[in-house]
Image (cartoon, grey):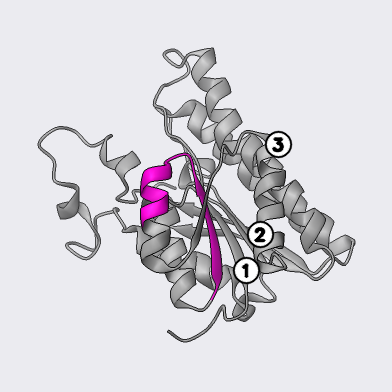
Amino acid sequence: MSGRLLGKIAIVTGAASGVGESVARLFVREGAKVLMTDLNQADGVRIAAEIGATFVRHDVTDPAGWQQVVNTAIETFGQLDILVNNAGILIAGDIETASYDDWKRLMTVNADSVFLGCKAAIAVMKKQGGAIVNMSSIAALAAKEDYVGYSASKGAVAALTRAIAADCRLKRYRIRCNSVHPDGILTPMTRATYPKGIDPEMLTIDQDPMNRACRPEDVANGVLYLVSDEARAVNGIELRIDSGQFVMSI
């Protein structure tokens, strides 16, 4: 442990698996006190006990739930320094096959939740400053024609992040807000999208640099940088963690 987050209090959503779990584990190792949230209570409680974090079952689409989570952080730890809006869902569909119900669900879970989380956290953070990282996707920046709703929801996250960064700077809140744009992360959510017979482990960049798959800890390391004091001048950026997939597509 290098103590890059020593004394910091963090909320990490979607923390019971995948990137959220990796972020929570890394934050604890770096000295932060972490409030993990997820709908998956069984895994969330188990992981929190294992790493020395606190877990709260949390529906990120519920405004009252967000207020409760932020209140829990304040009551338990006395402050809130970091918010990582990581919770999200993935539903495939192009413009002809995607249903309106899927569109609304993607927007609610992936975009509305980020608005709610930022709103609740900033009300507290504006008193002493803080750092927010919103999990977007390379799909917000490059064409993903077979994930039209997902792409739009993550595009909303990117635009919201820039607006929040500008707003907090103009108001002198000392709150930084950045978005992270991964692609091909090996998580339970994305593994389910691989064709049958394909071993995702063989598609990772540590197996072949031309492959695009990265591991959750690769994304967590980027998030750690953005919330650390080392990134104190980094605000409103879109950090791509995609093994060069974006630049290969333009």
For the residues labelled 1 and 2, say whether their Cβ atoms are less than 8 Å apart: yes
Instruction: Give the amino acid type for the residue marked by disc 3 in the picture.
Output: Pro
**Label 1 belongs to which residue?**
9
Magenta stretch containing residue 232, yes or no? no
- Please tell me which residue lies in front, 92 or 132: 132
Residue 128 visible to the viewer: yes
Q: Is residue 48 above or below residue 5?
A: above
Q: Position of residue 164 (x, y in %)?
A: 76, 52
Instruction: Give the amino acid type for the residue marked by disc 1 in the picture.
Output: Ile
Instruction: Name the residue: 52% across, 15% down.
Output: 101
Query: Which mark is on residue 63?
Result: 3
**Label 2 belongs to which residue?**
73
Instruction: Name the residue: 88% across, 61% down.
Output: 170
Q: Position of residue 117 (x, y in %)?
A: 67, 47
Instruction: Name the residue: 71% across, 50% down.
Output: 118
- Please tell me which residue lies in front, 206 or 4: 4
Badge 3 marks a residue whose secondary structure is helix
> Local crowd at mark 3 within 10 Å, few (<14), some, or many (≥20)?
some
Instruction: Name the residue: 13% across, 40% down.
Output: 198
